[in-house]
Image (cartoon, grey):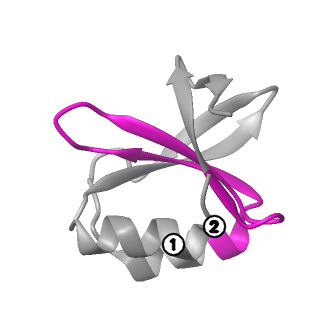
């Protein structure tokens, strides 16, 4: 786990592209900008300010998923499948 500012700085320094998923309903998330992979970190910060929980899918060689909880300022690695969080890293 790390705080959200550290997480954003890390992906920005590594010039990572990402997809954003926001909570929809009943434990499911919907993807934003599904046709565009973005590298706009200002956009990411804006989305974090307007949603209590989002999932960031980093588009590396092997996709990684992180749950960002703005209320408690935490970013943590998760397992994400079929629009649902299936496991949270300890």
Q: Which residues are magenta?
A: 48-75
Q: Is residue 59 above or below residue 25?
A: below
Q: Mark 1 and 2 residues: CB-CB less than 8 Å, in contact?
A: yes
Q: Nearer the viewer, residue 47 or 57?
A: 57
Judged from the image, the secondary structure of the residue bearing numbered disc 2 is loop
Q: Nearer the viewer, residue 68 or 2?
A: 2
Q: CA distance from mark 1 to mark 2?
A: 6 Å
The residue carrying pointer 2 sits among few (fewer than 14), some (14 to 19) or many (20 or more) residues within 10 Å by Cα, namely some
Q: Nearer the viewer, residue 38 or 77?
A: 77
> Where does residue 34 sit, x and y in percent of width and height?
37, 44
- Horizontally, is 36 left or right of 9 in the view? left
What residue sits 53% from the left and 17% below the top? 82
Q: Which mark is residue 6?
A: 1
What residue sits 38% from the left and 37% below the top? 64
* Quadrant in the picture for residue 24: top right
Q: Is residue 15 above or below residue 1?
A: below
Judged from the image, the secondary structure of the residue bearing numbered disc 1 is helix
What residue sits 77% from the left and 60% below the top? 52
* Quadrant in the picture for residue 37: bottom left
Is residue 57 on the magenta stretch? yes
What residue sits 25% from the left and 57% below the top? 17
> Where does residue 23 sit, x and y in percent of width and height?
70, 43
> Where does residue 38 sit, x and y in percent of width and height?
29, 62
- Horizontally, is 37 left or right of 54 in the view? left
Q: Quadrant of the C terminus?
A: top right
The residue carrying pointer 1 sits among few (fewer than 14), some (14 to 19) or many (20 or more) residues within 10 Å by Cα, namely few
Is residue 14 on the magenta stretch? no
To which residue does mark 2 refer?
3
């Amino acid at each position: 786990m790390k705080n959200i500012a550290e997480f954003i700085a890390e992906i920005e320094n590594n010039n990572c592209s990402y997809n954003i998923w926001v909570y929809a309903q009943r434990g499911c998330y919907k993807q934003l900008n599904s046709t565009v992979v973005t590298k706009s970190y200002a956009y990411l910060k804006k989305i974090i300010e307007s949603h209590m929980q989002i999932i960031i899918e980093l588009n590396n060689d092997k996709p990684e998923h992180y749950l960002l909880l703005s209320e408690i300022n935490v970013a943590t690695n998760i397992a994400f499948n079929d629009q649902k969080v299936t496991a949270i890293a300890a």
